[in-house]
Image (cartoon, coloured by chain):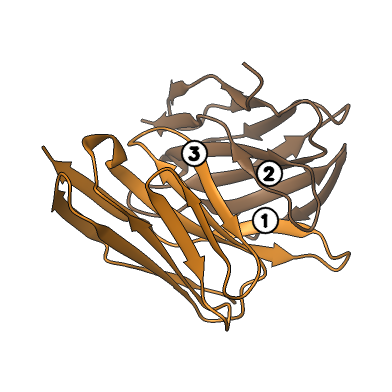
Amino acid sequence: SQELEQSPQSLIVQEGKNLTINCTSSKTLYGLYWYKQKYGEGLIFLMMLQKGGEEKSHEKITAKLDEKKQQSSLHITASQPSHAGIYLCGAGRMNYGGSQGNLIFGKGTKLSVKP
Amino acid sequence: DTGVSQDPRHKITKRGQNVTFRCDPISEHNRLYWYRQTLGQGPEFLTYFQNEAQLEKSRLLSDRFSAERPKGSFSTLEIQRTEQGDSAMYLCASSLGLASGEQFFGPGTRLTVL
């Protein structure tokens, strides 16, 4: 079965610093999702990547999917306290009909940003 | 608010009791998913529906768990004879069910079994 490994497990950065979170899959990814979760709350959708080499940005967050589609990174530029939370990567499972099935998640990366 | 909603947000129950959770997906989404998340872990898939049909169930979904989506809109997840190990956050998500269908999550229902 497919597994996703995230690194680091936790990260503490000073406000204004850049940071990168990695997500590695044991199998080729059909779709790679990044979510943010505040403690005890639901998941907030950030970005989805599907094509090898794809890169997407939203405000100060950039996500990339490597050419082999087995590794993704999430980069935050000039971090702010509002970026604090748990970042989860999820891999889409392809159903027989070619549609996206359920997601398989990594354990998450806990980010703290010190003001 | 047109996002995914879940009710209740918190539930405390005694071991052996039955509990039922409700999820209202984004209105045009035909796919609805249930996940369970325990502390320090990512969400784990339980089951999903396409319209009213339950298409897949995880091995995590024991026979004490049942889910329904009677009219292809809202869904309910029932846990019978709750056990302490059922304590978790139960998350619902919905999507358009396309090859590139983004899944949008609700706020979750936190279950505590005493």
Look at label 3 and name its amino acid.
Ile
Position of residue B80 measured from the top left corner of the image (x, y, whole percent) = 61, 34
Discs 1, 2: same chain: no
Residue at mark 1: A102
Disc assigned to residue B33: 2
In this figure, which residue is indicated by the disc labeled 3? A44
x and y, in percent, of residue A38 in the image: 35, 36
Q: Secondary structure at mark 1?
A: strand
Q: Chain A drawn in what color?
A: orange
**Rendering quarter of residue A24:** bottom left
Quarter of the image where the C terminus of chain B is located: top left
Name the amino acid type tagged 1.
Asn
Question: Disc 1 and disc 2: Cα gap in Å?
Answer: 7 Å
In this view, A67 is above or below B6? below
Which quarter of the picture shows residue A10?
bottom left
Question: Which mark is in front, 3 or 1?
Answer: 3
Q: Nearer the viewer, residue A13 or B77?
A: A13
From the image, state the color of chain B: brown
Q: Tell me if I can see residue B51 in this picture.
A: yes
Label 1 is found on which chain of the structure? A
* Drawn side of residue A106 relative to residue B104, left or right: left
Graded by Cα atoms within 10 Å as few (under 14), some (14 to 19) or many (20 or more), the crowding at tag 2 reads many
